[in-house]
Image: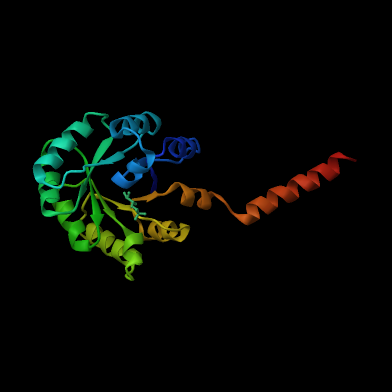
Amino acid sequence: MRIFIDSANIEEIREINSMGFLDGVTTNPSLVAKEKRNYRQVIQEICAIVNGPISAEVIGTDYESMVREAEELAKIHPNVVIKIPLTEDGLKAISTLRDMDISTNATLVFSANQALLAARAGASFVSPFIGRVDDIGNDGLFLLQDMLSIFDQYMIDTEVIAASIRHPMHVVEAAKMGSHIATIPYNIIKQMVKHPLTDAGIEKFLADWKQNSQK
Ligand code: E4P
């Protein structure tokens, strides 16, 4: 499973990228707004740091503005993938952008049917928001499993990005199911690195080493 970071914070992205496992980045309007910076500039800087798909979302909700914004965002860098919300206009935009050879990531996907339609319309990626499904008392991982088996059944080449990840076990479960990608917030990536037995092990090794070197 490929690992993306779900962040628009340059320091976070730089730090995680330096560990050598980062395959891409997803942003969304809320994440970019938190940075209080120019949108295009943020995307440009991310593209200069990470060599992989970088998702940038359109703000417009009608077909024409989605396509117009997508064309502008796609000019920033060849790695830019356009995030399009899953609506009727969104599906139309995904299909037009596919014909223009612009990669898309269908976002705000909450059902297997939405994922199937996005794939048939030509989305390069679909992003089921598993944490937000859990939030309303349903099972986000169940939704992810449904999508993966449908895509597998028909050998659909749209890649599934497990999104809205809320804890490290979401990542483990997504990987066990065969999700192509998980996009993970900075703090959860940090939790994935850490293990108390690793810390305790290092402490013990160092203490033993010091004792021995005093002899
Ligand atoms: C995915 O691409 C989205 O940016 C993100 O995962 C949404 O997560 P949230 O539900 O924590 O906002």
Q: Quadrant of the C terminus?
A: top right
Residue 186 image offset from top left, x and y in percent: 45, 46
Which residue extends farthest right? 215
Horizontal side, residue 76 vs residue 1: left or right: left
Res. 84 in view: yes
Residue 26, compared with residue 176, is above or below; it is: above
Query: Can you name the residue that lies furthest to the front here?
Result: 36
Q: Which one is nearer the viewer's eye here, 179 or 29?
A: 29
Where is residue 69 drawn, in percent x and y?
A: 17, 37
Whether residue 101 can be seen here: no
Q: Position of residue 83 (x, y in %)?
A: 24, 44
Say which quarter of the image contains residue 154: bottom left
Number of marks in the rendered image: 0
- What residue lies at 11% left-to-right and 46% top-to-bottom? 62
Please state which of residues 72 and 128 is positioned toward the viewer in this rendering: 72
Q: Position of residue 3 (x, y in %)?
A: 40, 46
Q: What color scheme is it?
A: rainbow
Q: Name the side, left or right, on which 36 lies relative to 211.
A: left
Q: Residue at x 39, y 34 (%)?
A: 50
Q: Picture quarter containing residue 94?
A: top left
Could you say which is closer to the camera, residue 134 or residue 193?
134
Q: Residue at x 49, y 37 (%)?
A: 15
Q: Vertically, is 128 above or below 94?
A: below
Residue at the bottom extreme of this rendering: 137
